[in-house]
Image (cartoon, helix red, strand yellow):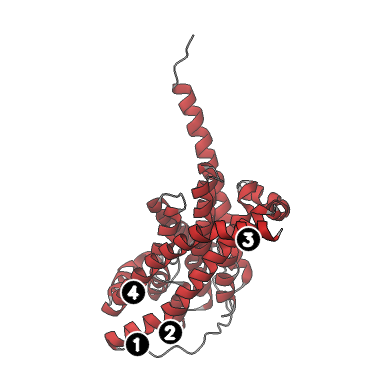
Amino acid sequence: MIRRLWSAAVAAWRPAWRTAWWVVRLTVPITLAMSCLDRLGVIGWVSHGLAPLFGLMGLPGDGALVFLTGACSNLYAAVAVMATLAIDYRSAIILAVMGLICHNLIIETAVQRRAGATGWQMALLRVAAAVVAGVSLNLVLPAGLTGRLWFAEPAAAVTGWGGVLVAWAATMAPLVAKMLALIVGLNVLQSVLREFRIIDLLVIPLRPLMRVFGLADSTSFLWVICNVVGLTYGGAAIIDEVRDGRATPAEVRRLNAHVALSHSLLEDTLLFATVGLPLFWLLVPRMVLAAIVVWVQRLACRLTGKRSLRRQPVTQ
């Protein structure tokens, strides 16, 4: 047993390290570029241009800045921006759901592209789904919805390029360590669980839920990873599945579409819950949208397949 455990861990170590290092090399320059663009005022300038669109969702013009910050960076940055603005409770719910669907877009899209998805399609899907969610919630949420937001004291504003670089480095150092540890650890764990066929036992309770979502039973474990540790780290696990041919292209395509809209149900959801937003609205819209997208995708594939069969000439 010890020998099997060691062999499984060693076999997963090297490819896991390559994947982790690729994610780190992707993340570091992108986050630095986003910090520089923010310092130059580019993000604020673009968000000002998007303000009329956000008015259609019942959001103030400043809502565009919150959304764009999360889309280009991460949800922690979006919450920090939200804390500095006079965002009301109802608008905060809408912005939170939009941000949960569409955040860290550049990095997560690149990871999904490596994990078997089409990058531009995933990016377009997430942006479109965020807009649909915003418009839908504006129609559904009561106009007089009120509540209390519990924001921490805003951090002191970063001044000068030196301050930007110091703040960026302070954020990236623990993040890089977390990436390396989580991605390598998850891949090794996945290999060990597969060696002892424990994954087969873990997926059984999730089969009914996977069928509701329109996903294959075999993707249950990957779905759990994406929703516990997030899309960047979960995507690394999907990359491993794709590389080793343990998932079909159709299964990977559907899983990517689902987790693009609904992932990190633990950490990201709790982030907004801690500032006073209701769990129902943070969870249910994303899961419903993700399920709808997968079932529409399945229907489109079935219709396309039937049309292609009709076009085939009849041979005698």
Q: Earlier in the sequence, mark 4 or mark 1?
A: 4
Camera-near label (2 vs 3) is 3
Residue at horizontal 58%, vertical 70%?
A: 269
Camera-near label (4 vs 1) is 4
Q: Which residue is mark 3?
A: 6
Q: Up-down: is 278 above or below 130?
A: below
Camera-near label (4 vs 2) is 4
Q: Secondary structure at mark 4?
A: helix
Q: Is residue 136 left or right of residue 163?
A: right
Q: Are marks 4 and 2 in contact (CB under 8 Å)?
A: no
Q: Secondary structure at mark 1?
A: loop
Q: Secondary structure at mark 2?
A: helix
Q: Residues within 10 Å of mark 1 (few under 14, many from 20)?
A: few
Q: Which residue is mark 2?
A: 84
Q: Up-down: is 136 above or below 181?
A: above
Q: Is residue 262 left or right of residue 67?
A: right
Q: Cα distance, mark 2 to mark 3?
A: 51 Å
Which disc is residue 32 wearing? 4
Q: Are marks 2 and 3 in contact (CB under 8 Å)?
A: no
Q: Amino acid at mark 1?
A: Val
Pinpoint residue 239: horizontal percent, then vertical percent: 49, 54
Q: Earlier in the sequence, mark 1 or mark 2?
A: 2
Q: Cα distance, mark 4 to mark 3?
A: 38 Å
Kindly tell me whether residue 230 is visible in this rendering: no
Which disc is residue 158 wearing? 1
Q: Amino acid at mark 3?
A: Trp
Which quadrant of the structure image shows residue 106? bottom left
Q: Are marks 1 and 2 in contact (CB under 8 Å)?
A: no
Which disc is residue 11 wearing? none
Q: Up-down: is 236 above or below 299?
A: below
Q: Foreground residue, 189 or 128? A: 189
